[in-house]
Image (spheres, rainbow, N blue to C red):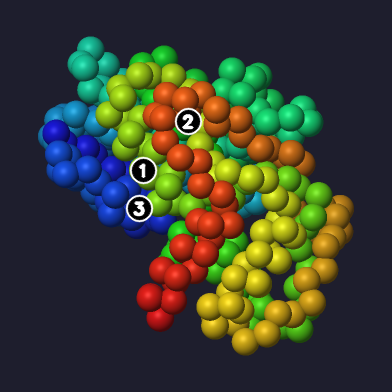
Amino acid sequence: MKALITGISGQLGKALLSTRPENWTCVVLDRHALDLSDPDAIARVVDAEQPDLVLNAAAYTAVDRAESEPDLAHAINAAAPGDFAKALAGSDKRLVHVSTDFVFDGAKGRSYRPDDAKNPQSVYGASKAAGEDAAGSQAIIVRTSWVYAAGGANFVRTMLRLMRERDEVRVVADQIGSPTWATGLAQTLWDLAESDQPGIYHHRDAGVASWYDFAVAIAEEGQALGLIERIPDIIPIATADYPTPAKRPSFSVLDVSATRALLGDAHVHWRTNLKTMLIEEMALG
């Protein structure tokens, strides 16, 4: 079986390759090998490779910059999934497309189910919501949140750097969600692909947290492992105290019960996965 993986230079793309089941061979593409804003290029690569599966792990993820680059965000996040769906149409090949908690407005006050109405509040969120629609009913769509991995560009590694450099770190405490270790997400994507049941699914690590909670855990686990020498003052702040161009959902916890029931697997707590990731980070030097 052959899988085509986009976004291979990103943390999820790398995790997908490292967790590849033995019965799959992979064609991996980064932004230089495939311009996702070019529908003809997408059609050509699918025609040339004839993959059994497309794992679309690539995305425009610069949430704030998307407010000033809406056309590019929509070309990559909204149009490209539709182009993959068109290229695979009429075959038994499957598209697995990764989406986000940002398709929701954060106002519900309970975990979001896959069938809850979308109401994105940012250009990024709107582009990802449109990408879900474009991917179509035959795709496997997986929403996730707060993804991180060793060696990647993410909140965990940013916090470690700031904690080494500063005596005080200020972190938003009124945005609630769930961290997601990229390796666990990748394993779920492969499992859903092999289940071959199209639909919308959610994946995140067990437990919930604010960004402040996440930062405190990073500090505690990071110091215990010797990644930082001392824990700086970590100051909780409100979203209003840290204005950004894009609006973030205040509560975007995803209900993953349907995914876990289908796959019958364990749901690992985010703090356990954080420690595993930090051990991997140590191994990277």
Which of pointers 3 and 1 lies earlier in the amino acid sequence? 3
Task: Establish if 160 lies above or below 24.
Answer: below
- Label 2 environment density (alpha carbons within 10 Å; few <14, some 14–19, many ≥20): some
Which of pointers 3 and 2 lies earlier in the amino acid sequence? 3
Q: Could you say where residue 133 lies in the image, as x and y percent from the top left?
A: 49, 21
Return the residue nearer the eye: 46 or 223. Answer: 223
- Would residue 198 appear left or right of 72 to someone viewing this image? left
Kind of residue indicated by mark 2? Arg
Name the residue carrying label 3: 15
- Label 3 environment density (alpha carbons within 10 Å; few <14, some 14–19, many ≥20): many
Kind of residue indicated by mark 3? Ala
Q: CA distance from mark 3 to mark 1?
A: 8 Å
Name the residue carrying label 2: 260
Secondary structure under the numbered disc 1 in the rendered image: helix
Q: How many marks?
A: 3
Q: CA distance from mark 3 to mark 2?
A: 20 Å
- Would residue 135 appear left or right of 159 to someone viewing this image? left
Q: Which residue occupies 73% across, 45% down?
A: 176
- Label 1 environment density (alpha carbons within 10 Å; few <14, some 14–19, many ≥20): some
Q: Which residue occupies 65% across, 51% down?
A: 64
Return the residue nearer the eye: 156 or 32. Answer: 156
Secondary structure under the numbered disc 2 in the rendered image: helix
Q: Could you say where residue 241 lies in the image, as x and y percent from the top left?
A: 86, 59
Kind of residue indicated by mark 1? Gln
